[in-house]
Image (tube, rainbow, N blue to C red):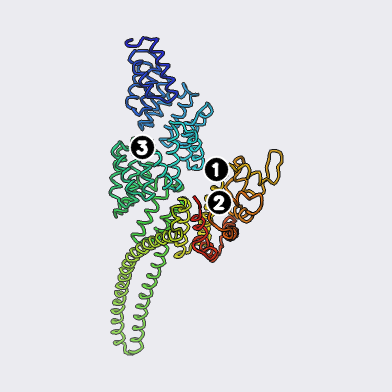
């Protein structure tokens, strides 16, 4: 040994172990470098140094140190396990799995090994096996890192609520090494639920803290694209391409290019992704063919697109609910573009069988039904013209037979009749050809006209919805919580669409009543909750609302009190519960609630009386029928509710909700 003597090297090794428990990996490396140079023959030396290098992001160096350690200490379980983790970090999941298999029996009660093995299995799409390993890890003391991988498994299997619950628990522990991973997973979950804006806001928090990992740039880019921030998405794509993008990153970029109607760019990225694939995960081939088929269709390369899409639907993944719907949508478009509307109808129907909420298939199927009806009308017109020509020829023959009595003349007329029949058949052929040409022209014009009309209508609806809300909220727009604003915008947009479609009133009522209920939670319940804390009045308020005590159980006058009792873990108050406390706010047990309304909102008492009646009316007219499945909601009632909610309330403008927001005191 050189430099350190054995006693000093062993002491420094123990110091490094203590620092590793604190997560201070830079100090671990500093301590272990001279220990490794001293020649101390302990497996812990390369194991600890390799782990420090891995945690510091220097994975190739870590691999070299651990492989050298295994040459010196062959079969050492800890070294093999740490090397498996490095292979996983280097995006070599198959090597990682093989490595973990070797040590699974040796370290069968090590939760870290079991957790890392599960992460590798998940990476190659073996979610069920991964979940089994995680169950074992939890039984032998697996901690927050085990639960975080379990949340990833739940997300992969579509159990989004369960995944979010577990990730939220891990995030709440605020462990330095895991809190940002948990937050990133929750961003992915928001994206999976369709909340692109919420996902992007979370990614921005992670990036602002300097915790955004390179492999996460593509997910953030996808969220930015769906949230309408294309320049940000492009910047993130460029940053990821400047590093060493994975095949999954390039596949995502190809799908984003298809979404932007940039099919050639999509094909270029797809080719790069295919070149990087070492061992395709389940579903990769299906996703690749689906992406390729759509890009080729957008490039109008119909034969090549048809071949790719047919190969995709022949794979087992095409039978999976939701996942398998995409190729059938593109096959439907291809059939419609060639005039085969029956086949298009069948493909779109198959897509909706796999994913009943697939929006592109829904819209395309409706248009296909219109085109089928239109074509049948054209065909009927053509048949009528053919029949008319035949009838005219038959009438001509009968006239000549009756008029002439001489046999020779009859023969001559018969010959002439034959010639005219031939002419009639030719005319029928011409009429048929003209009808076919007219049908194709009308279909092309119709497609273009429908597309232009739909685009114009969508723009008009969007503009009208935003204009209406900005007009009624005025200066109070900035004071409106963003989540509430988005809910109102969705409701108003749906209402505007309903003016052009046969959308049932219940569909709009669900959105408006939900937004109204959320506004009461945000503006009254939550704000009152904070007011009680700031003024240290929670205990007093709850005591005033007690109807009866039964041992350790409390029965309140109203469920509104339960929602503010932290020990009850109750849900937020409903429309009915808010309306009752507004109506009874003059009761002694609600004196503090009345004081809150007076001190926080510059509104007169008559407003609150009218507002309470409005909340009750809304509950009975809209919320209760929707909740109990009565979809025959009256349009007039819905229009009256929308008018009072947004535009005119109590004979004054704007409506109840904008006035409530504008009247909030600082």
Q: How many marks?
A: 3
Check the picture and name the quadrant holding the N terminus: top left
Q: Is residue 330 visible?
A: yes
Disc 3 from disc 2: Cα separation: 50 Å
Q: Which mark is residue 630?
A: none
Q: Where does the image place residue 333, in percent across and percent down from the top left?
A: 36, 56
Do labels 3 and 2 touch, CB within 8 Å? Answer: no
Residue at image mark 2:
599
Cα separation between marks 1 and 3: 43 Å
Residue at the disc numbered 3:
215
Please tell me whether mark 1 or mark 3 is closer to you in this view: 1
Q: Residue at x 50, y 29 (%)?
A: 143
Query: Alpha-carbon neighbours of circle 3 within 10 Å: few (<14), some, or many (≥20)?
Result: some
**Label 1 element class:** helix
Residue with the mark numbered 1: 534
Residue 637 falls in which quadrant of the image? bottom right
In contact (CB < 8 Å): disc 1 and disc 3? no
Q: Looking at the picture, does residue 453 appear above or below residue 109? A: below
Q: Is residue 128 visible?
A: no
Left or right for 228, reference 157: left
Q: Are marks 2 and 1 in contact (CB under 8 Å)?
A: no
Residue 484, image x, y percentages: 48, 52
């Amino acid at each position: 040994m050189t430099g350190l003597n054995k006693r000093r090297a062993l002491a420094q090794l123990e110091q490094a172990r203590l620092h590793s428990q604190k997560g201070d990996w830079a100090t671990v490396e500093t301590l272990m470098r001279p220990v490794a140079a001293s020649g101390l023959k302990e497996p812990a030396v390369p194991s600890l140094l390799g782990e420090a290098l891995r945690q510091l992001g220097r994975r190739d160096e870590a691999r070299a140190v651990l492989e050298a350690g295994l040459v010196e200490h062959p079969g050492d379980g800890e070294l093999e396990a740490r090397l498996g983790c490095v292979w996983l970090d280097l995006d070599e999941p198959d090597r990682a799995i093989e490595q973990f298999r070797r040590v699974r029996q040796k370290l069968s009660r090590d939760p870290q090994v079991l957790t890392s093995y599960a992460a590798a299995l998940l990476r190659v799409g073996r979610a069920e096996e991964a979940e089994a390993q995680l169950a074992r890890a939890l039984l032998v003391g697996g901690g927050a890192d085990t639960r975080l991988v379990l949340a990833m498994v739940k997300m992969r299997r579509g159990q989004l609520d369960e995944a979010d619950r577990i990730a939220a628990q891990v995030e709440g522990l605020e462990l330095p090494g895991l809190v940002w991973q948990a937050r990133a997973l929750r961003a992915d979950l928001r994206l999976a639920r369709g909340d692109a804006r919420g996902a992007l806001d979370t990614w921005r928090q992670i990036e602002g803290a300097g915790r955004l990992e390179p492999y996460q740039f593509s997910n953030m880019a996808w969220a930015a694209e769906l949230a309408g921030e294309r320049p940000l998405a492009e910047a993130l794509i460029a940053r990821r391409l400047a590093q060493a993008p994975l095949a999954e990153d390039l596949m995502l970029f190809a799908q984003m290019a298809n979404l932007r109607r940039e099919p050639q760019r999509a094909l270029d990225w797809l080719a790069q992704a295919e070149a990087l694939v070492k061992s395709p995960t389940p579903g990769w081939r299906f996703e690749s063919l689906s992406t390729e088929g759509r890009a080729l269709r957008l490039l109008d390369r119909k034969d090549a697109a048809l071949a790719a899409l047919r190969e995709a639907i022949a794979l087992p993944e095409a039978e999976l609910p939701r996942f398998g719907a995409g190729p059938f949508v593109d096959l439907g478009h291809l059939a419609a573009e060639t005039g085969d509307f029956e086949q298009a109808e069948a493909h779109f129907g198959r897509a909706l069988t796999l994913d009943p909420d697939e929006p592109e298939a829904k819209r395309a199927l409706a248009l296909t039904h219109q085109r089928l009806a239109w074509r049948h009308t054209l065909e009927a017109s053509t048949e009528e013209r053919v029949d008319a020509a035949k009838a005219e020829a038959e009438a001509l023959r009968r006239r000549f037979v009756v008029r002439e009595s001489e046999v020779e003349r009859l023969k001559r007329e018969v010959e002439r009749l034959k010639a005219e029949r031939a002419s009639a058949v030719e005319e029928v052929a011409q009429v048929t050809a003209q009808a076919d040409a007219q049908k194709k022209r009308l279909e092309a014009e119709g497609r273009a006209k429908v597309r232009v009309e739909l685009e114009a209508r969508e723009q008009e609806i969007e503009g009208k919805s935003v204009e209406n809300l900005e007009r009624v909220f005025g200066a109070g727009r900035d004071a409106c919580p963003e989540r509430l604003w988005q809910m109102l915008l969705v409701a108003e947009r749906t209402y505007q669409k309903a003016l052009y479609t046969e959308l049932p009133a219940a569909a709009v009522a669900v959105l408006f009543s939900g937004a109204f209920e959320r506004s009461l939670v945000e503006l009254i319940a939550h704000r009152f909750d904070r007011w009680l804390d700031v003024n240290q009045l929670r205990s007093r308020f709850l005591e005033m609302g007690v109807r009866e005590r039964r041992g350790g159980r409390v029965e309140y006058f109203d469920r509104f009190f339960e929602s503010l009792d932290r020990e009850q873990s109750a849900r937020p108050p409903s429309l009915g519960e808010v309306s009752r406390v507004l109506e009874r706010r003059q009761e002694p047990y609600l004196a503090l609630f009345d004081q809150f309304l007076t001190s926080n909102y510059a509104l007169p008492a008559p407003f609150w009386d009218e507002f309470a009646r409005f909340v009750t009316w809304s509950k009975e007219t809209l919320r209760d029928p929707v909740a109990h499945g009565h979809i025959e909601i009256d349009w007039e009632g819905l229009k009256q509710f929308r008018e009072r909610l947004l535009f005119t309330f109590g004979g004054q403008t704007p409506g109840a909700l904008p006035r409530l927001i504008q009247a909030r005191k600082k």
